[in-house]
Amino acid sequence: MSSPAPKTPGSGPVLGDEPYPKRWLALAVIAVTVLMIVLDATIVNIALPAVSTDLEITAANQQWIVTAYTLTFGGLLLLGGRIADFWGRKRTYLVGAVGFALASALGGLAVNEEMLFAARALQGAFGALLGPASLALLTVLFTDAAERAKAFAVYGAIAGGGSAVGLLLGGVLTEYADWRWCFWVNVPVALFAVAAAIRIVPESRAPGDASYDVPGAVLVTLGLASLVYGFTKVAQASQEDPQQNAWTDGTALTFIVVGLVLVAAFVVVEFRVRNPLLPMRLVLDRNRGGAYLTSTLVGAGLIGSFFFLSLYFQEVLGYTPVATGFASLPTTLGVLIAAGAASALVPRIGPKPLMVLGGVLAAGGLFLLSFLDVGTGFWAIPFPGQLLLGLGLGFTFVPLSNLALVGIGAHDAGAASAVLQAVQQIGASIGTALLATLSVGAITAALTDRPATQEDPVAGLEAQVAGYTTAFTWAAVLLLIGAVVSAVLIKATKDDLPTDAPVHAG
């Protein structure tokens, strides 16, 4: 333990040895911005047709509305985590929030695709500062095991249910206002959070050596960005030419291989430098490594629910954007129920049983969705399937966040939280490419067996459903593998969760 750092005039609250008295208020402020980041990943999805029409974005370039964000967000996360540790988590949080607001305002003012893509890239860059800083602040604010479980329950509920809320909000804004408000809505939210955080959120930073691992930062940023871009090109190739095997696309494979080589070089560097960007002890710890691998698989499988289910509601059942948003809410309901229960159960039974149960439930929900048909009623399969998925995600995210971050020193809080978010992002990128390729392949096969004609117009819809249900099936497999990984690798029990963690002053 270290003594509280001296507080200079105008510096705001500083975190010391004792439990911070306003930690629950700080959690509320942090939760607002975490929700903003999660919402931004899906709020634009329903608005894609309107955005593309207004700015005359071609189908081939449409994916950049999403990819420009994921490239910078995924590529810069580890660097953002270390900046938060050394520069100050509150300071990094504030800069990230203000930058995210400015980038969102720029996106709403976009007059062409280049301006929109640039704004999305800036959102990702500032999100890579805001995300790790937010989670690292939770880690050092809540040192009691029971309190930390409750704090992570809030984070887990946001991480699991925020995507569905984003679909709902995106549908409402697109249908009743304008797609530009999908960006502008972030501005007042971020400014409110900044104003509140200045007074409420305490500053903390890593003690000791604060030098930056520049070679590691360059290697991992370029490596992760190359991987994300490569997997995105696979998905794009599968959409542009369904007859060809997208995984043989030369450009995609080149970027994936280069990304793997750069990440391998990064690992070598991290073992040799004095103050690594990512201390290998974080990943090589059996429990934490298992949590990271589970998080990767969950990220890969989760894309199969929101993306393909949104398409099913709109293109097969003919739902409006708002109706699609409301139809996606059962997942959020399940997450909220399970996250509340998990926060009470983690300190009592430990993280492993809940992570295994969560993976099985989520996989079961996606497997149920694989039985959808052209005329399936909402209450028959989509509602119970999404509810099961949400329950599974809630039981998974709360112990996952706790296990990945609990017990680490304050020196590594930002790095550990950045890894958790980075592996989810990489998992989502891999999942997008894998499931999109499998889906397109199933659609092509269905249309080959039964071509869509004027005499048989339903054949086209049934082919689409075949593609979506194939994606749901394989997404269920990924989540089930995640449950197996948790069962095999996670050894931590409730007794391994410390009641007190080292907290250092800023």
Image (cartoon, helix red, strand yellow):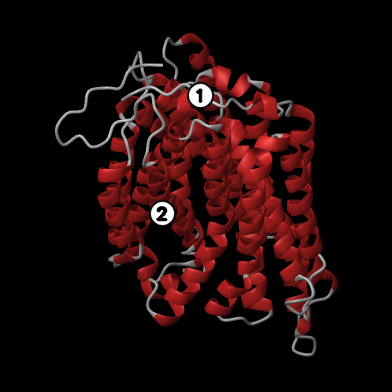
Residue 377 locus on image (x, y percent): 76, 80
Q: Residue at x 66, y 24 (%)?
A: 496
Label ID, residue 32? 2
Side of 194 where 393 appears, left or right: right
Q: Give, as a three-letter code, the residue at label 1.
A: Ala
Residue at the bottom extreme of this rendering:
455
Locate the N terminus by quadrant.
top left
Side of 263 where 182 appears, left or right: left
Residue at mark 1 to residue at mark 2: CA–CA distance: 25 Å
Q: SS class of the residue under badge 2?
A: helix
The answer to whether marks 1 and 2 mark residues whose Cβ atoms lie closer than 8 Å is no
Q: Residue at x 60, y 60 (%)?
A: 240
In the picture, residue 390 is in which quadrant? bottom right
Side of 173 where 256 appears, left or right: right
Residue at the left extreme of this rendering:
9
Q: SS class of the residue under badge 1?
A: loop
Side of 460 where 251 appears, left or right: left
Q: Give, as a three-letter code, the residue at label 2.
A: Val
Q: Is residue 104 above or below residue 168?
A: above
Visible in this render: residue 243? no
Locate the C terminus by quadrant.
top left
Label ID, residue 85? none
Q: Is residue 6 above or below residue 440?
A: above
Residue 447 locus on image (x, y percent): 78, 71
Q: Is residue 167 above or below residue 348?
A: below
Q: Nearer the viewer, mark 1 or mark 2?
A: 1
Visible in this render: residue 355? yes
Q: Nearer the viewer, residue 308 or 22?
A: 22
Q: Residue at x 71, y 63 (%)?
A: 387
Q: Residue at x 62, y 52 (%)?
A: 340
Label ID, residue 501? 1
Residue 236 locus on image (x, y percent): 58, 55
